[in-house]
Image (spheres, coloured by chain):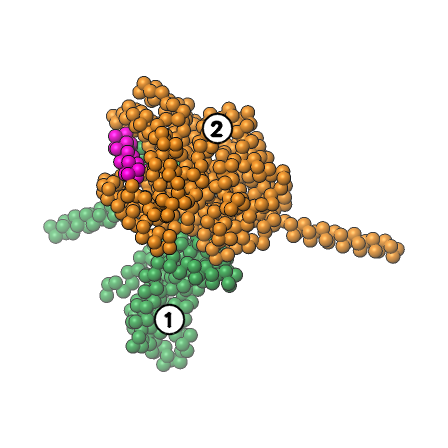
Amino acid sequence: MARAVTTNRKLINTLIAWAIGLLIFFPILWTILTSFKTEAQAISDPPVFLFFDWTLENYSIVQERSNYMRFLWNSIIIAGGSTVLGLIVAVPAAWSMAFVPSKRTKDILLWMLSTKMLPAVGVLYPIYLIFIELGILDTRAGLVIVLMLINLPIIVWMLYTYFKEIPGEILEAARMDGASLKDEILYVLTPMAVPGIASTLLLNFILAWNEAFWTLNLTAAKAAPLTAFIASYSSPEGLFYAKLSAASTMAIAPILVLGWFSQKQLVRGLTFGAVK
Amino acid sequence: MTLSRRSASTALGLIAAMSMTSAAVSEELTIATVNNGDMIRMQGLTDDFTEKTGHTVEWVTLEENVLRQRVTTDISTKGGAFDLMTIGMYETPIWAKNGWLVPLDDLSDEYNVDDLLPAMANGLSYDGTLYAAPFYGESSMIMYRTDLMEKAGLTMPDAPTWDFIKEAAIAMTDRDNEINGICLRGKAGWGEGGAFITAMSNSFGARWFDENWKPQFDTQPWADTLNFYVDLMSKAGPPGYATNGFNENLSLFQQGKCGMWIDATVAASFVTNPNESTVADKVGFALAPDNGLGKRSNWLWAWALAIPAGTEKEAAAKEFIEWATSTSYIELVAEKEGWANVPPGARTSLYDNPDYQSVPFAKMTLDSILSADPNNPTVDPVPYVGIQFAAIPEFAGIATEVSQEFSAVYAGQQTVEEALEKAQALTTDAMEAAGY
């Protein structure tokens, strides 16, 4: 009897999980479906779900009109560069906060997070002027720096949380065995925190990939990533939903594939330390 | 031998000089623009420009509001990210006054600046100097279903009144068959519903400010405008019109769900395109309505090309302007894509062209543009230029808030009186804060 109840509960939980999953995924599914419709079908009322004349015309138009590979390459460099640079800065920072905390560590952590509370547009002009002065407007290097700084609080917080779960005694033992600070971080701490570091890396890569304020405002033609590619398909005068959906599908496809293949690592990392 | 060596060295010098000159004049231009059909067509024809001048072009295409924010940030900080910008009639006089734009007072004779439609040239000038060249211009007009009008037993005059429009809209409405007598913009935003209601209010005798910059939302013409609009839309408009903008109404009209639609003249090519519209062969055109007060409810707008002051590629940028807004460009588009697809509303000669005269909406587009006067937009005098906007920097922010209050009325969230009271208060506060 108890077994039957458990099975029923499992079934209900599974159904609820699937329902929530589908609900969250539905906008993406709708975007993908719309990308295969004509502009007229895309705005038809009542909307058509699956039974329409599937077409690849929108993809062909988008391919013809835009240099997708250039936008994609810029996205990879900017998201990848900012994430790696962020990790290089954040790992030592999180290590010191987790294993050598001071009286002010918690204040510093909260202060770092508080920088995320400022609306980005509030600092647009100062940052734009700095970019002009440094000559890094519309460059990938400029965006790597900005996105790294924007995501740094999250990276440090995540790594700090993971590092706190690692017993300090192991690091002490390494030190007693003569490990230097670099060895301690690189060869002892990092391997133990791989799931946490991997999920931090993936999450920040996704955040940087999707960032659409700075990437639109600090680029023009040369460093524009896929967010600018999508923005170019919205039109104030004329139907654009099907073409915009095709562009969006092309923009999210790489990150969807990455997320799909790394979901185990991502979930493992995100739940790291949640259950003791 | 000596001579030949000298000759050889002279020749080499000349070749080097020529290649240097060629390198110096061959520029790469970065142009910011919007994703409108005419702009996309221009991008596709850029090779012609490169072939003629040697200059190449990098396009930055953005959504209208993103573009506005992006180019405003760049030009106000002298960022230099763009060599050319696509801007409208609202920005041009304000930016020219700030010294942010290069004056276009030395365009070549072949360009024939006098051929630009006077309404467009005036709207894109400041202190009598042209600062942006119109790529395409538009007004607004009535697009209506000829079959439904006939079924209603009515005939659309060329220049109808609002009373006739209301009568026709109610007669054409067939809720059972999802046909709405009229579709109008109600979406919040100064360039969306705000533009429509401002242009409409001009025909009711309303104005944004009196000659002393005092807001006028507490006057009877504004109450008349809003009450008429709400009454008309509740009787003959589509459900949820408070969130409908250009594209939503375009979609409704193309699906045969609107009897009439008053909107940008550029929409005429969409609703008569049989590949997109189910009613392509049943569309008629008329001037935007009036109330017999001497002002119609049509607006005037142009997407134009301007050069930010300080660009190092000014000469090449001017060459691009001369190419993109010339009569030969219009002929190029006509040759490749047909006369119905040429950028309208910029040049007088286009409307004298017999080939273009055969396009069904050409005459009404020109009549609409000619009947719009941005320097005298209202029945009573005003201190500002602009029909559906007032060309002052504060307007975009204020009008966005005002249009949000109006949209709340359309959505049934407040009364006309409440919205006008709030509009008056917020506009007064903003204008006082700005020092008017």
| Disc 1: host chain | A
- Mark 1 highlights which residue? A93
Q: Is residue A258 visible?
A: no
Residue shown at the point (52%, 35%) measured from the top left: B117
Q: Position of residue A196 (x, y in %)?
A: 34, 63
Give whichever of B57, B227 is nearer the camera.
Answer: B227
Nearer to us in this view, B307 or A206: B307
Which residue is drawn at the image coordinates 39% and 40% (left, top)?
B381
- The chain drawn in orange is B
Give the number of callouts: 2
Mark 1: few, some, or many residues within 10 Å (few <14, many ≥20)? some
Q: Residue at 36% across / 29% down in the picture?
A: B292
Q: Quadrant of the N terminus of chain B?
A: bottom right
Mark 2 residue type: Ala
Residue type at mark 1? Ala
Q: Is residue A31 above or below residue A45?
A: below
Residue with the most extreme right position? B1
What is the drawing colour of chain A? Answer: green
Q: Which residues are magenta?
A: B220-244
* Residue that label 2 marks: B362
Q: Chain of mark 2?
A: B
Side of A77 where A15 appears, left or right: left
Q: Is residue B46 left or right of residue B406?
A: right
